[in-house]
Amino acid sequence: MVAMTCQPRPAATIDRLSVRINQRRLQVVADVRLPRGGSLTAYLPDRELAALLPRSILAPVGRSEPSEVAETVAAILRRTLLGRQVRVRQYAAQYYMAFLSWRGVKFEGKDLRIEVKKRL
């Protein structure tokens, strides 16, 4: 029997973020800095966006212009996500980002330590 060892997969960091309306859908796009240098553009999937924002922000009561909703969402997401670590995955010809698992977050004394583990 051969034991497999895994090195932790480094996480990328969100440097810049934009929100736009594309074909009547809200789309979040970020420039992420890769751990070994370089950067790329990655999209935030709808399931990740739903974990961050309540539906009431995306569908406010009353009449709001789509651009107003996009500006509000962009302001919230910039404060929440800039500098945050994410995993980047490629699907088809685009890159998508996903947040790290809570299982890797450890609190030690006054510091927060994040362990990034690769799944087999």
Image: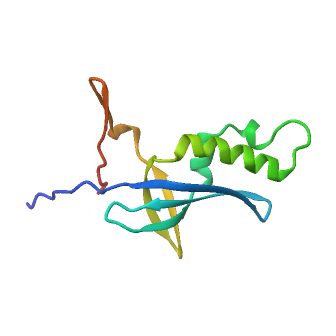
Residue 33 on image: x %, y %: 42, 60
Q: Is residue 97 left or right of residue 20?
A: left
Which quadrant of the structure image shows residue 115?
A: top left
Residue 3 appears left or right of 35: left
Indicate the position of residue 35 as horizontal and vertical percent values: 34, 60
- Residue at image position (71%, 58%) is 20
26 versus 84 height, above or below: below
| In the depicted structure, whether residue 87 falls above or below residue 68 | below
Colouring convention used in this rendered image of the protein: rainbow
Q: Nearer the viewer, residue 17 or 118?
A: 17
Which residue is at a point 64% across and 56% down the rendered structure image? 18
Residue 4 image position (x, y, % from top left): 15, 59
Give the position of the C terminus as an image quadrant. Answer: bottom left
Left of 106 or right of it: where is 15? right
Q: Which quarter of the rendered picture does the N terminus lie within?
A: bottom left
Q: Residue at x 80, y 42 (%)?
A: 59
Q: Can you tell which quarter of the image residue 2 is in? A: bottom left
